[in-house]
Image: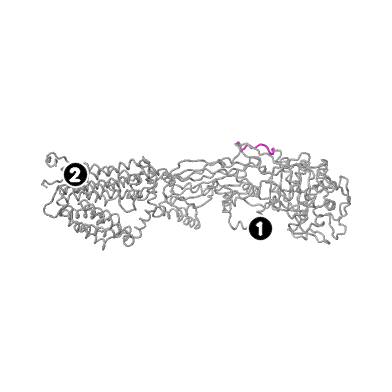
Amino acid sequence: MPQKRQTIRDHTAEANLFARRTVVSIAFVSALMLVIIANLYTLQVSQYEDYQTRSNGNRIKVLPVAPNRGLIYDRNGIILAENRPVFSLELTPEDVDDLDQTLENLTDLMNLTENEIAEFQKARKRQRRFKPISLREQLSHDDVALFSAKQHQFPGVSIEARLSRYYPFKSALTHMLGYVARINKKDLEKLERNGQLANYAATHDIGKQGVERFHEETLHGEVGYQQVEVNNQGRIIRVLSFDPPIPGKDIVLNIDINLQKKAQEVLADRRGSVVITEPSTGGVLALYSSPSYDPNLFVHGISQKEYSKLLDSKDSPLLNRATQGRYPPASTIKPHLALLGLEVGEIDEDTTIKDRGTYRLPNVNHVWRDWKKWGHGDVDVTRSVEVSCDIFYYDLAFKLGIDRISDSMQAFGFGKRTGIDLYEESGANMPSRGWKRARFNEPWYIGDTIPVGIGQSFWNATPLQIAQSLNFLLNKGKRHVPRLIRGYMVEGNVDMLPIEMLSPIPMVNERNWDVILDSLYGTVNRPHGTAHTAFKGTDYVSAGKTGTAQLFSVAQDEEYDEENVEKRLRDNAMYVGYAPYNSPEISISVVIENAGGGSSNAAPAAREVMDYYFTEVKPKGIAAAPNVNNNDANNADTKRFVNPVTMENEVSSGN
Amino acid sequence: MATKFNTAKTTFLERLHIDGFLLFALVCLMGVGLVTIYSSGGQDWDLVNRQLTRLGIALLVMVVLAQIPPMAYRRLAIYFYGFGLLLLLAVLFFGVIGKGAQRWLDLGFIRFQPSEVMKLAVPLMIAWYISQFNLPPRTRNIAIGFVLVFIPTILIAKQPDLGTSLLVASSGIFALFLSGMTWRLIFVITGMAGAFTPIMWFFLMKAYQKQRVLTFLNPESDPLGSGYHIIQSKIAIGSGGVSGKGWLQGTQSQLEFLPERHTDFIFAVFSEEFGLIGVVGLLFIYMCIIVRGMMIANLAQDAFSKLLAGSITLTFFVYVFVNMGMVSGLLPVVGVPLPLVSYGGTSMVTLLAGFGILMSISTQKRLMSR
């Protein structure tokens, strides 16, 4: 467009030029608008689902909700482990106007310690302002009452409840029942290995010992989930959906709490254990290890000081003696060896030896002594059990040899775990040639065999194994696996679990059983029997066997003198027995450490328990199907409730 | 022109020198803004009331400016520009620092941003300068025009305020473009600008500005830091879908995942709650305003008015495009509000002042022969 002069303006041409530029501009604007729309179309239509998902991912959080742990009952429906609400005092900083003043007032009211306030202040720095912070855990009932009355004066401060395990019988059941405690790093690793981590996402505690540990999976239940909407700070705005957790199963044990308490009472402050079983089922009626401790200490975290005290105690209270204590079974296994002798024909009913108090092997310069210095005189197999003759069994062991003994005693459960539903169990040791070679790289000497005849040498066994071997005997070879769990509590009725059995011990001559059981009868009921004194005048007929385990080797030319032996090296007193003789209902295994002779120490303890069973427990009908619905005062506390989620409805408004 | 003979039958709005169509469209936008501010601000009536007050003041300014005839603007343009430059220099030496930038002048009773003045002063100045010559202007005059544009632009960019300097620069460049600068010159300048980009990157841009650009290019590289805004904004828009989540139902905004949700990022809130349908509706209103503005420019009787009206209108579009572009991830984040919708005072007054001038041009036509 030629244009040289400034003076004359061509308005029409200028207007046309401007109009063309306007059209270009509008076209340009329209193109850019289309770009915007195309971009929005991509975001809102093509990629809608992707962004929709991410938007939900922003706002929706899935919170796990812990299931309520299953309760544990004894066989009569008495609650042994329950879930109790524990209360804590919590403060939400956001809802408190004057924090310092509030803390001061609370200190006046509740006697907050400086430590509690310091802990609170530390936690406050770490947390969001709308998250409650605990000022005091485990409030006493007085604390709860005190605060509740004044709650209106403390906006933003409240009492929160959560369920926590409680063991009402405290130390009576500790080793058997175990306890739960806070999940630690090791537990987490194990849960991860088992693929159970997600199931424990909201769970606070896990079974650490005993039944609580063994039946953890049953008791725990399955985690539930709550879908919540959160804002950018993680505050819960509302609950979108709730998939409730499945509570753990309630377990019923074979334990009879009264019998268990009696066992505790009988042992008192002596070290040892009492195992009571039901021979007809293998059910464990009582399993007590002494000394014990209060499992509730562990639930809320035991202090280092208290833990050290338990750990360092010479009496090893943490050990479950009934299943982990390894004791020489001593004379309690004489009946088993006698049975083996009869079965393989090394002896018969009429075999008699002359016991003059000592036993020698040809060409061996060693003397084995009888516990009775001058011996028992003429002894046949029945009498050998009744008077607990040692010489008879030195000779029998020599005749049988370690291989036959070892094989046979393993069939009676020695040397391996019984399979009771506890992880804290030792298989103890049934020696054999192979074992000695592996353990000491030494051959088995004939001199090792002789003391095996009286349950010594390298032989050791747990009180539960001893109890089990007695049951195998009195059941004439039928083998029940010892069981703590009886079944599940379902709506007030027990859903019984099947009885577990192993293949029976074969016996060529069935009469051999009767010979041996008769000798156990004689031990208690014939005047020369070692348990006769202890069981004099019972209303029931029982049978049993005493045992005295030697812990201290008496030099060849010395005598064992109880007074001169240090207390911890004194003999362990043992007794195994059952009653009634004709149709056994209970069998018992008592071990009392360093108490001295079995007949004078363990047998009376066993009798006390048996008496209690026949006078107090049995008349009330043991094993009656429990019905907890009608009379249990604990019901109120054991009701399940779902953990409440704190609802915070207000949305903060702008900036 | 038919209207100039019908002066007897003027309506109330015409007597007030108000363009009815434009006013209606502007009020529609303001309505959208208030509704969205109410939602994004957590249903806070205070926020809405404060915005209403600002709108009232801004509308008043618009009406007042509409009364001033275009020729007065033409006469005052050079003084206005000069005054604006002085203020920018004053900011450089005595300015108040806020939010990491030196943009404000503290006059004791009020703090204000002189750069806002420039948004109007630059188009006024360029329109005045260019309209003195026959159009299309000569390259020399165009060059002088560019100098007039870039002095304030650079001063503002130095504050630093990338968004405003962009708007100021485009307002001047649009005036030059509309004046009829040759296409050849346009391509040359575009090429030069392209060459200038690396120089800007290495010598002129601040670290935070570079960060913004980098974040824009790949927001996912820093999802919790500088990429957070844009990621959350895209999630808000995308999750709105075709029909939106509904008013007050936008989770991204209601649950505060979205930053700056009632100011610069209000478009994301709108998109989330009203969806693509709502957005297209909103763009339609903007398009109406732009088309009307360009009509006014074409109908204006003198070159000054044409250039000024066209420049104001196209700059308004730059607001829209840059804001929507940055919120939806097309452009890097620069602080440009969504015009007449975003919460905020200064830009609102400047924008409506511009529309006041536009209305003055639209309604105050001199009876003159061409």
Image quadrant assignment for residue A596: bottom right
Q: Is residue B138 left or right of residue A103?
A: left
- Magenta part, dominant SS: loop
Amino acid at dot 2: Ile
Q: Where is residue A447 in the image (x, y as percent from the top left)?
A: 82, 57
- The numbered dot on residue B18 is 2
In magenta stretch: residue A621: yes
Mark 1 and mark 2 on one chain = no
Q: Give the range drawn in magenta.
A: A620-629
Q: Position of residue A213 (x, y in %)?
A: 62, 48
User: Does A277 appear above or below A558?
Assistant: above
The numbered mark 2 sits on a residue in which chain? B
Q: In which quarter of the image is the N terminus of chain B?
A: top left
Residues at marks 1 and 2, CA–CA distance in whole angstroms = 97 Å
Q: Position of residue B331 (x, y in %)?
A: 34, 51
Instruction: Give the labeled residue for mark 1.
Output: A313
Viewer-nearest residue: B194 or A221: B194
User: Does A621 appear above or below B65?
Assistant: above
In terms of secondary structure, where does tag 2 sit? loop
Question: Alpha-carbon neighbours of circle 2 within 10 Å: few (<14), some, or many (≥20)?
Answer: many
